[in-house]
Amino acid sequence: MQNVSACIDWGVVFIVKQEWEAYWDNYRYPNSFMRSDIEPFNNPVRVMVADLSRLGSSVLDVGCASCISYPLFEDVMDYVGVDFTPKLLKVGKKLEPSVMAVHGYALQLPFKDGAFDTAFIKDVLEHLGPEAYKTVIAEMWRVVKLQILLVFYQGLLDKTTFSQKREPDEHNIGVPPYKGLTYYFNRYGRQDIIDTITQLPQLNSYNIIENVPREISGDKTRTVVIVKKSKKEGKCCMRDS
């Protein structure tokens, strides 16, 4: 994106973070977060998302952390990352000096309507407060022209469950007042996601792809939901596989 400032809505007021979100602000190991592999960007689900994003020429990575996926887009299309954790963004800019990464909140994205062709979110919806996923999906939809890609850490269930976990001291800073911070780890119901998607304006189609490999080897999988946008309101041609 030649001038990212042109697509930022400078009138957005950042939402005050909830108490449970302090977990990510105080994450102890920002340099290694999701970077355990030699080439962490080069795993099947990230490559799949990058390939799907080539439908257009610009992409927004929502909850980009340290911009792990950036190398897949660097020489192909305009990439912008957005995250609400400054220390992770700092790592991303250190490792990838040319990356465009913006401090912002998924529930109130600081971008203008239709600023990007594609927006994707990976392994973030699981950590939102109850019902917040609906707002995030709507915000992603608002800022795209063509499609959004939702990557779920695990498969979709029959019923949505919101649950908080307490991390004793392994990942967060481990000293008061941070020791014992809680964070969300949710599982989403298939029908709840479909209901949210089908309420989006200008919906063209959606496709649910299950059992996408999370790693180059192993049996762990993710679920990818592709939601495509029509240029104008019209009949939705839905596909669910």
Image (tube, grey):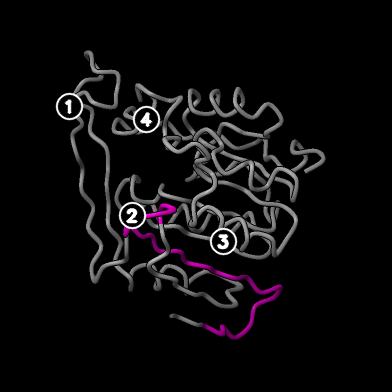
Mark 4 highlights which residue? 24
Q: Are marks 1 and 3 in contact (CB under 8 Å)?
A: no
Q: Are marks 4 and 1 in contact (CB under 8 Å)?
A: no
Disc 3 packing (10 Å; few <14; some 14–19; many ≥20): many
Checking the image for residue 232, the label placed there is none
Q: Secondary structure at mark 2?
A: loop
Disc 4 packing (10 Å; few <14; some 14–19; many ≥20): many
The amino acid beneath tag 4 is Trp
Whether residue 77 sits left or right of residue 138 in the image: it is right
Checking the image for residue 131, the label placed there is 2
Answer above or below: position of 123 versus 52.
above
**Which numbered mark, 1 or 3, is in the foreground of this view?**
1
Residue 208, image x and y in percent? Answer: 44, 72
Q: Quadrant of the C terminus?
A: bottom left
Residue 232 falls in image quadrant: bottom right
Label 2 or label 4, whichever comes before in sequence order: 4
Would residue 39 be counted in the magenta stretch? no
Label 4 or label 1, whichever comes before in sequence order: 4
Which residue is nearer to you in this view: 132 or 220? 220
Q: Which residues are magenta?
A: 214-238
**Which numbered mark, 4 or 1, is in the foreground of this view?**
1
Q: Secondary structure at mark 1?
A: loop
**Which numbered mark, 2 or 4, is in the foreground of this view?**
4
Label 2 or label 3, whichever comes before in sequence order: 2
The amino acid beneath tag 2 is Glu
Disc 1 packing (10 Å; few <14; some 14–19; many ≥20): some
**Which numbered mark, 2 or 3, is in the foreground of this view?**
3
Mark 1 highlights which residue? 168
Mark 3 highlights which residue? 148
Which residue is nearer to you in this view: 161 or 51? 51
Cα distance between the residues tagged 3 and 4? 24 Å
Q: Secondary structure at mark 3?
A: strand
